[in-house]
Image: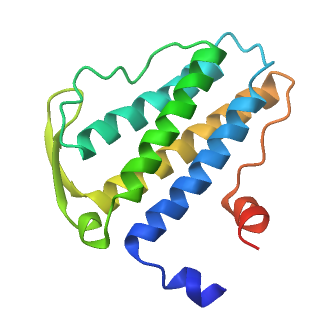
Amino acid sequence: MFAANYLMSPAEHVRRLHRYDQWANGLSLESLRDVDDGGFSLRIFGHILGAQQAWLTRLRRQDSSKVIIWEQLTFSECAERFERLAAEITQYLDELTDNDTEEPCSYANQRGESFENTRFDILVHVFMHCHHHRGQIATAVRQGGGNPAATDFIFFVRSHES
């Protein structure tokens, strides 16, 4: 089991991280359903979705300048976008080959600054970015009297890969 996970291909590695990310994002979204923190957690979750959309657009070699990455969304809007975006990312990753992961991807950020990174590095960044913001949501949920979701990677591995 350990050797198989350690030796997985780059494309399979990002697909695994995506499965974890979507599981954790789903739990995080559910944890903020009844928390009243003035909209902070929904704004952060909306940012997670906006950033994922921007990066997916860039990975598809499209202009992401019109993607709103800090949009205030309702819980139902977050839930709908989460499901739609998860499916889009899954489809993108299902078509991704190992060679694609090392391919350079040129893009511009929301300020119009140009960069180039490999698709693998961009995808790992996307998942780490979500992880960071889920931590902010967990703190806000706890401060709002709720129970934050347990979204650690090891919990995903234990429940989905054993």
User: In which quadrant of the rendered view does residue 2 lie?
Assistant: bottom right
Residue at 53% x, 83% y is 6
Instruction: Tell which of 137 and 60 is nearer to you.
Output: 60
Residue 44 visible in the current orientation: no
Q: How many marks?
A: 0
Quadrant (top left/top right/bottom left/bottom right) for the N terminus: bottom right
Residue 95 lies, in percent from the top left, at: 34, 58
Residue at 61% x, 12% y is 74
Is residue 124 toward the left or the right of residue 29 in the image?
left
In this view, 46 is above or below 3: above
In this view, 105 is above or below 55: below
Instruction: Tell which of 130 and 142 is nearer to you.
Output: 130
Residue 75 lies, in percent from the top left, at: 65, 17
Is residue 153 toward the left or the right of residue 19 in the image?
right
Residue 134 visible in the current orientation: yes
Residue 129 lies, in percent from the top left, at: 47, 45
Residue 68 lies, in percent from the top left, at: 35, 20
Report the coloring of the rendering.
rainbow
User: In which quadrant of the rendered view does residue 44 lie?
Assistant: top right
Residue at 24% x, 43% y is 60
Is residue 71 toward the left or the right of residue 134 in the image?
left
Quadrant (top left/top right/bottom left/bottom right) for the C terminus: bottom right
Instruction: Tell which of 67 and 89 is nearer to you.
Output: 89
